[in-house]
Image (cartoon, helix red, strand yellow):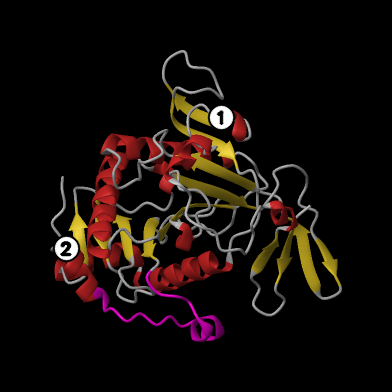
Amino acid sequence: MPELRKDPILGRWVIIATERSKRPNDYRSTMPAPAAEHRLCPFCPGNEGKTPPEIMAYRKDNSKPNTPGWHVRVVPNRFPALRIEGGINREGEGIYDKMNAIGAHEVIIETPDHKQTLSTMTNSQVEEVLWSYRDRVLDLKKDKRFRFILLFKNHGEAAGASLDHAHSQLIALPIVPRNVIDEIRGAREYYENKERCIFCDIVRQELSSQVRLVSENDHFICITPYAARFPFETWILPKKHDSHFEDSQKYEFESLSRILVETLKRQGKALNNPPYNFLIHSSPFNHNYHDEDYYHWHLEIMPRLTNVAGFERGTGFYINPTPPEEAAKFLREMEIDP
């Protein structure tokens, strides 16, 4: 059984994922897969038996579970960081705290087409992916053991993707991660001082100044954040205040899919299709933060262009060699196909 262990100095939790040691080729460099490798890809149609049984799928009429005919398919991660079975079982070991690593770890297979990526999919296809995120979050929120869900995507080997086929992941946790707590605390302090959401103020200021604005549509803006940690880091924020991603409406998912595809196309063309991570920070649940007034969900995209080295790891400071204003201008002026 994997464990969650709490650092007694910093208060952060670490997953000791013993069962992931079964993953093949851990910590070894691998050669790129040959062109025909997708025929063996467990995420391709016809290979549904190579994954655990599906949790959910959007399918053509009359197609059966765990067979071809799906548009988006969600399955348990074959090598999960956490296990959904069992109790939390909090306990101490001297000065140390630990609990069972209870949670959910799921894979969202975004398309049946092995060659497609989010940036090449249609807006309606990407919207379906966003709906699958929402459906899974709403279902997992019913489990009172869970307090936070992270939706994230690793695109490219350098970003942590172990398979080329387009997919993203979901992890539900029984605790709220330290960096999320810090983000919520900062938002709460700002609200207590000014009685305004800091994210809403960021949206207003970036729309006014335009210097870090990459693009906007009716319901979302894309910016390079003022204190960007990484070159060409971008954030997508809803213009309307909302603390929970899963509360978004259909018209918002339509707008989000458009600006997400557009942003990935801009970064792809500007940076030669870099590996990247994206994640959705949404409000925790089953908690006592009462953060609906001051927390604002958002999506962060981080191209993997530089390495996190000793200084960053030792201090928590990031060194970004590209001013976000220059990155925003470069992305904003990038011509892309509609």
Range of the magenta residues? 305-324
- Which residue is under mark 1? 48
The disc, 2 or 1, on the residue closer to the chain's N-terminal end is 1
| CA–CA distance in space, label 2 to label 1 | 40 Å
Question: In the image, what residue occupies the spot 42% across and 71% down?
Answer: 192
Number of numbered tags placed on the structure image: 2
Circles 2 and 1: CB distance less than 8 Å? no
Instruction: Estimate the x, y position of residue 88 in percent, counting from the top left.
Output: 76, 52
Can you say whether 143 is above or below 10 in the image?
above
Q: Dot 1, crowdedness within 10 Å: few (<14), some or many (≥20)?
A: some
- Which residue type does callout 2 highlight? Arg
In front of the other: 81 or 22: 22
Quadrant of image for the C terminus: top left
Question: In the image, what residue occupies the spot 42% across and 44% down?
Answer: 35
- Which residue is under mark 2? 332
- Which residue type does callout 1 highlight? Glu
In front of the other: 283 or 100: 100
Does residue 305 appear to the left or right of 163 in the view shown? left
Can you say whether 232 is above or below 283 in the image?
below
Q: Reply yes or no: does residue 297 show up in magenta.
A: no
